[in-house]
Amino acid sequence: MQDCPIKKVSHHHPCEEFTFNFVPENLIPINQVTKMRGGFRGGLSRQGDTCYRCGGTGHWAINCKGLGNTGNTGTYTIQNYLCKLLFVFFFLSVYVCLATPTEVYEALRDLGYQSFRPGQEEAIMRILSGLSTLVVLSTGMGKSLCYQLPAYLYAQRSKCITLVISPLVSLMDDQLSGLPAKLKAACIHSNMTMKQREAAVEKVKSGQVCVLLLSPEALVGGGGSGSGCLPSAQELPPVAFACIDEAHCVSEWSHNFRPCYLRLCKVLRERLGVQCLLGLTATATLSTALDIARHLDINDQDGIAVRSAAVPPNLHLTVSVDREKDQALVSLLKGDRFGCLDSIIVYCTRREETVRVAALLRTCLQGVKKIRKPLKWQAESYHAGLSASERRRVQNNFMCGELRIVVATVAFGMGLDKSDVRGIIHYNMPKSFESYVQEIGRAGRDGEPAHCHLFLDPEGGDLHELRRHIYADTVDYYTVKRLVQKVFPPCKCKQIHQKQQELLEVICEEDSSDWPRERVCHTHERAIPIQETVEALDITEEGVETLLCYLELHPQRFVELLHPTLSVCKVSCYDGPRQLQKITKICPPVAVVLARRRMAGERVETCDHLEFDVVEVADTMGWQLPLVKRGLRQLQWSTDRGGGRSGVLVEFSSPSFYFRSYGDLTADEMDRVCWFLHSRVQDQERTQLYQLTACFKAFKSVAFQSVLSCIDDLDESRSLQLKDLLSEYFDKRRDRDHTLKPLLDWENQIRADIRSFLSTRSDEKFSGRAIARILHGIGSPCYPAQIYGRDRRYWRKYIQFDFNQLIRLATQEIIHIK
Ligand SMILES: Nc1ncnc2c1ncn2[C@@H]1O[C@H](COP(=O)(O)OP(=O)(O)OP(=O)(O)O)[C@@H](O)[C@H]1O
């Protein structure tokens, strides 16, 4: 980056009791309060540190007048915390530093690199200037350096850490060992034992590490300290900045949306006070990038720092439509293009298919001259269903070049740092261009030529299959409504408030057209059991979690999600009812539960055990849940001098979603919440369908009729044509105005089938969606494929028809029969 000026600022931190009047004239203030923890607003120029521009001290880089200048443009006074000054000063100023100081180049060399790759320098300088940034760079272009270098520099200056949130728990240990030796790091994730986690936390607290790798779940978990596996914010060293790897997961419009990512930025800001966020992703359309930028609070245009071409030039792409896919695959692997390639990944959608195709390749590639490898290293399958050791074995063999072909589901390759993968073959079509680009991006990371081929199903089979997955994830209005009723059960706050108001004779008129500015209810802690909810509503756990996240992120912040908890408590007294009566005296929650039962007319005198929702009881009492649970657990131990077991057994069960929510929503407000959720769900569905259709159409437009046209030679023009289509897709905003064809001619037949289906199962209750799912062959918790898939008269029968239209027909038929 060339010589250029520095803009921006400094401001006072309210938490620190000191003042200073060092405000250089041409610094532009930012009206944003920097919190004590995190952000490291201000980059690296500080009083006492070297100026980025000239290397002199005592002035800001923006006021630099030349080499060695040490002139002050102001003075500052310190009233307190003198020893903290330099450190605090670090937080207090914000610059955009456009010239890269030598210090940064030195750090680059320290980490083992001679020069920056495109985009790295710009992103690094923004982070060093305390500006949140999104980096969209193709796979293998060196995104990691964008956090490693600033983390290294910040740590050199002060005792602080950089948080790196990465979704790949299984690969986190590899990621850790792959960091430059100078960057001391640790990781915390849910696969670690308690002991390992404690050791990592100790390291962090004692300042031995400057980078902390975290899984999103480890960070986002609620609980008293604010985070699932993390020490509280006060115990952590200050956070310089946080890097979110695979940042597209933040956006619901991305191909790989993860609900806990939605809450990530919020948690980082609100619980850890992090101000500066760096998002890294290899695949994001313009719409997705803008959406991620919104989550990262990037307001300036430069915030999406780098957007590179979606597909690197060294990748050569082809597509073909073949009736005999197996045979076509073998021909491709025997041909000139792929025949001599050493490391190849073949992607399949289904696990069983990976096993079958790997076996096929072992058989069919036997004795092929171009391949020098021994048979046993020819092809192996890889999917999430294999044991961890088996997966590691396959991956290691592939990494060290002993295994030539891995036939895998998408589970393989994420975070894979093998620079010489030479070929990627898609045996099935991926679900979106984003997935495609990410998967082919695993080839040719060393910049040498690499080949990619995709087999497109001539009947559109893959398209239907992928469409099924999308429909499987969406929920109907009725289901949303049932969930909303579970999340917002009515409380008594409103009645109590009204009574108070009547006493005070205050008449309060609410404007029903808008959300009330202040709610009467200040939220309650609630738990809804996961399994029970999944079964009752017939949606996946992830589906419920997503809806709860939407509610949390609504401007009204309808819920605050806490870490899942065991919500059912069972207290059993081996010494009978008298023992239960006795413990009411030492354990108020038990007394409350028993009193309620008595008031409900139960004969509690004969009762020797109790089962209750501990979250609800704690909330009613206004006690903290951990405190109540601890008290209950203690009942198991005798208070007598001798100690030992008391004869009371306390068990907690039923993993539950745990959150705070309002209880004073009116019926109208509940409806509006439902509409809000449902429209989000529908938007999601439409977007995914659009992504899928766009992908299919584009592949079809460049496909050869047979793989034989491209097994030996490459038609570069078609490869470029596909790359153009990809660029166009990534640069275009989301277009959701696609419509699927109606099923006019088939309507009568489908209606007849629905009626016949309902008559064979007249003792069961179905919703329109449930029937549409069966007609599409989509299993769900209440209507599993193992049972409903047996009846081939209906299962998957109408897979090629629009799902929503099937719901409409089924709903009409259900009403008609009633
Ligand atoms: N400035 C550089 N000079 C030389 N090599 C570099 C530079 N930056 C990164 N690399 C190398 O490029 C390779 C890929 O880097 P990195 O893993 O950061 O890519 P990435 O963009 O994060 O890829 P992915 O999307 O797969 O995570 C690594 O081997 C890394 O050492």
Image: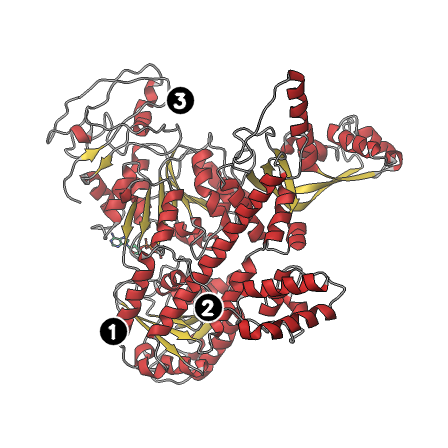
Whether label 1 touches label 2, CB < 8 Å: no
Residue 52 at least partly seen = no
**Quarter occupied by the C terminus:** bottom right
In the picture, measured across the screen, residue 83 lies left or right of residue 772, that is left
Whether label 2 touches label 3, CB < 8 Å: no
Where disc 2 sits, the SS reads strand
**Amino acid at dot 3:** Cys
Name the image quarter holding residue 631.
Answer: top right
Name the image quarter holding residue 504.
Answer: top right
**Label whose residue precedes the other's in the sequence (1 or 3):** 3
Mark 3 is surrounded, within 10 Å at the Cα level, by few (under 14), some (14 to 19) or many (20 or more) other residues, namely few
Question: What is the C-alpha distance between the residues marked 2 and 3?
Answer: 53 Å
Give residue 202's mark: none
Residue beneath disc 3: 15
Name the image quarter holding residue 435.
Answer: bottom left
Q: Residue 325, position in %: x, y? A: 44, 80
Of 80 and 563, nearer the camera is 563
Q: Is 460 rendered above or below residue 816?
A: below
Ligand 1 visible in quadrant: bottom left
Residue beneath disc 1: 717
**Amino acid at dot 1:** Ser
In the picture, measured across the screen, residue 455 lies left or right of residue 310, that is right
Residue beneath disc 2: 408
